[in-house]
Image (cartoon, grey):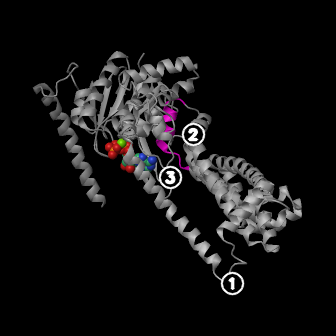
């Protein structure tokens, strides 16, 4: 069971509490994320990618317009939309299994059920043998595996990922990308994935949405017609990267110009 | 591979800092041998050097003409302490002081942590309590003694009252600061895992504030041990504080100095005990 997410004329304005200054982060965004697709969101820094994700998660309020999931307006956070954070956001006082178990405790499962699911999730993301380690004892890659397992243990129809691999080295990132793909293909799950890497977007996404410089809108959406597993050295892969890269570069330059104008 | 990590984590560290478990714990333990023992003996010698020097200086000073009556030597003080130990007198005083310090510390801990958490969660509670706390906080523990005696007379209750007054604020303020500074991402993670505000409080805010709360409690415990002695000097008929004040009046510098040494050692032991307990129950 997967879910469709729909933004209609979605606007987000932040108001700085101290200065009263307003920032228009998203400006009348119209966009639909199909059920079961792997959507990659790219755009210049500060264009509102995280903002969009946080609104889908229900962590940020909608200023204007509507944001719905399967037709129902998003009113707040919920276990149906799991999130993976760039900063991992693991609970440092809980070991790996206890971290993964968090959502299951919230659901009120029995101890036996919780442990079974948590151990399966740990196994799935390659954390076998580290079940009782604490976050501070893990490498960045391991921590993010815990972050992913924790979200997946809840079996959310929607998975939100905000630059989850940005802080990892290239080898670890590739391994986790691979694992994420197999996790997504196995379950019919909608993934919304923010990244700054065009290559990562083309490697992972069913579609790639490129956002404009702030105030953020959807500039273009590109279909990635390639089958998994994708070969990043193939000519077709390189051809697909080109338009994404060009569109992104255009917006990054615009963002730089407006930043200079402000300075 | 992680099997040995528990031992590593629970090993005592000064200041409560924890060494990350780098490399394989087992292989490191196996390498621990003669060289390690020598290094440890050396560290011990360095730590003992200054105390031993001071004791030697003390012994020399005590022998110089004229100071003998006011400065008994280490041997004389030890003899007195030994005497008081076998007579059971020392135990009575230590037990009385510990009992009061503990009672005051527990009362202050319960109220301080509860009030700090309540202030962190409720704007209203914060607005009500913040003013009074800031007004009462600067009043030193000594200044509470006259009021304590007026209200509770001489004895257990007034000493406990003074201790509570002298350590509740540090507990409260540390708890408040820790509970207000919970990482936003941790709260967001819990929210996206379905947690309700109440569950955020019990499963995120409180455990995340725990190191800060523990720090406040540890500082307060030292404060309670200091406070009990001050209060006992005035408001009781037994306890270590009373013991050394009475010894001063009856001109027994050996008991005064011996009492101070016991106070120091008990304080040290309390701190050590606290850290050991803390390491058992937290992993951060
Ligand atoms: N809580 C907030 N209060 C005020 N302004 C905010 C807040 N969060 C974000 N903003 C502003 O909204 C705009 C969009 O921020 P957002 O974090 O969504 O960008 P982003 O696309 O995720 O950027 P990056 O790629 O650097 O992560 C930025 O100008 C940012 O300064
Ligand atoms: Mg962002």
Circle 2 or circle 1, nearest the eye:
1
Q: Residue furthest left?
A: A235
Few, some or many residues within 10 Å of mark 2 (<14, 14–19, 20+): few
Q: Secondary structure at mark 2?
A: helix
Residue A51 in the image: state x and y as whole percent: 40, 40
The answer to if B189 sits in the magenta stretch is yes
Residue, disc 3: B14
Few, some or many residues within 10 Å of mark 3 (<14, 14–19, 20+): few
In the rendered structure, the answer to whether residue B161 lies left or right of residue A6 reads right
The answer to if A211 sits in the magenta stretch is no
Closer to the camera in the image, A103 or A172: A172
Q: Quick check: do tags 3 and 2 share a chain?
A: yes
Q: Secondary structure at mark 3?
A: helix
Q: Residues under labels 3 and 2: Cα distance?
A: 15 Å
The disc, 2 or 1, on the residue closer to the chain's N-terminal end is 1
Closer to the camera in the image, B216 or A12: B216
Task: Relative to B92, say whether B244 is above or below.
Answer: below
Residue A199 in the image: state x and y as whole percent: 21, 33
Picture residue at 74% right of the left edge, 54% below the top: B101
Q: Secondary structure at mark 1?
A: loop
The disc, 1 or 3, on the residue closer to the chain's N-terminal end is 3
Q: Quick check: do tags 2 and 1 share a chain?
A: yes
Picture residue at 36% right of the left edge, 26% below the top: A191
Q: Residues under labels 2 and 1: Cα distance?
A: 52 Å
Q: Is residue B269 visible?
A: yes
Q: Residues under labels 1 and 3: Cα distance?
A: 42 Å
Q: Is residue A59 visible?
A: no
Residue, disc 2: B280
Task: Relative to B241, say whether A35 is above or below.
Answer: above
Residue segment shown in magenta: B180-194
Residue A158 in the image: state x and y as whole percent: 41, 25
């Amino acid at each position: 069971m997967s879910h469709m997410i729909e933004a209609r004329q979605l606007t987000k304005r932040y108001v700085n509490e101290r200065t009263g200054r307003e920032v228009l982060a998203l400006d009348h965004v119209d966009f639909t994320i199909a059920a079961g697709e792997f959507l990659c969101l790219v755009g210049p820094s500060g264009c509102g990618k995280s903002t969009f994700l946080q609104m889908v998660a229900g962590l940020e309020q909608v200023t204007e317009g509507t944001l719905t999931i399967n037709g129902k307006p998003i009113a707040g956070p919920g276990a149906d939309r799991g999130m993976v954070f760039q900063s991992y956001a693991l609970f440092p006082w809980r070991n790996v299994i206890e971290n993964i178990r968090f959502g299951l405790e919230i659901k009120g499962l029995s101890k036996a059920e919780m442990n079974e699911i948590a151990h399966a999730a740990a196994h799935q993301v390659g954390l076998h043998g580290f079940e009782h380690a604490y976050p501070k004892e893990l490498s960045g890659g391991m921590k993010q595996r815990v972050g992913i397992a924790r979200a997946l243990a809840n079996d959310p129809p929607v998975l939100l990922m905000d630059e989850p691999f940005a802080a990892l080295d290239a080898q670890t990132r590739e391994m986790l990308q691979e694992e994420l793909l197999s996790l997504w293909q196995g379950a019919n799950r909608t993934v919304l994935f923010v990244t700054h890497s065009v290559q990562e977007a083309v490697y992972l996404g069913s579609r790639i949405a490129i956002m404009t410089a702030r105030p953020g809108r959807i500039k273009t959406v590109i279909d990635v017609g390639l089958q998994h597993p994708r070969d990043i050295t193939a000519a077709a892969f390189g051809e697909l990267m080109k338009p994404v890269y060009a569109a992104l570069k255009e917006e990054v330059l615009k963002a730089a110009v407006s930043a200079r104008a402000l300075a | 591979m992680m099997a040995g990590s528990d031992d590593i984590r629970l090993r005592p560290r000064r200041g409560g800092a924890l060494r990350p478990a780098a490399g394989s714990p087992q292989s490191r333990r196996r390498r621990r041998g003669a060289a390690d023992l020598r290094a440890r003996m050396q560290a011990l010698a360095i730590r003992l050097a200054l105390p031993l020097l001071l004791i030697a200086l003390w012994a020399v000073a005590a022998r110089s003409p004229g100071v003998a009556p006011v400065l008994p030597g280490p041997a004389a003080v030890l003899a007195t302490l030994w005497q008081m130990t076998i007579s059971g007198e020392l135990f009575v005083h230590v037990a009385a002081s510990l009992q009061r310090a503990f009672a005051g510390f527990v009362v202050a801990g319960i109220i301080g942590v509860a009030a700090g958490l309540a202030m962190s969660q409720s704007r209203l509670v914060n607005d009500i309590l913040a003013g009074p706390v800031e007004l009462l906080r600067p009043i030193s523990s000594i200044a509470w003694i006259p009021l304590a005696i007026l209200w509770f007379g001489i004895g257990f209750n007034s000493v406990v009252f003074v201790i509570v007054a002298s350590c509740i604020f540090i507990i409260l303020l540390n708890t408040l600061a820790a509970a207000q500074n919970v990482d936003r991402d941790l709260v967001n993670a819990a929210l996206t895992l379905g947690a309700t505000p109440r569950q955020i409080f019990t499963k995120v805010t409180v455990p995340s504030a725990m190191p800060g709360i523990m720090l406040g409690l540890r500082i307060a415990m030292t404060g309670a041990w200091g406070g009990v002695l001050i209060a006992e000097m005035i408001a009781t008929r037994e306890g270590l504080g009373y013991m050394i004040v009475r010894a001063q009046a009856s001109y027994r510098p050996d008991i005064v100095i011996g009492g101070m040494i016991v106070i120091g050692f008990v304080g040290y032991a309390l701190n050590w005990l606290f850290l050991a307990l803390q390491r058992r129950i937290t992993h951060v």
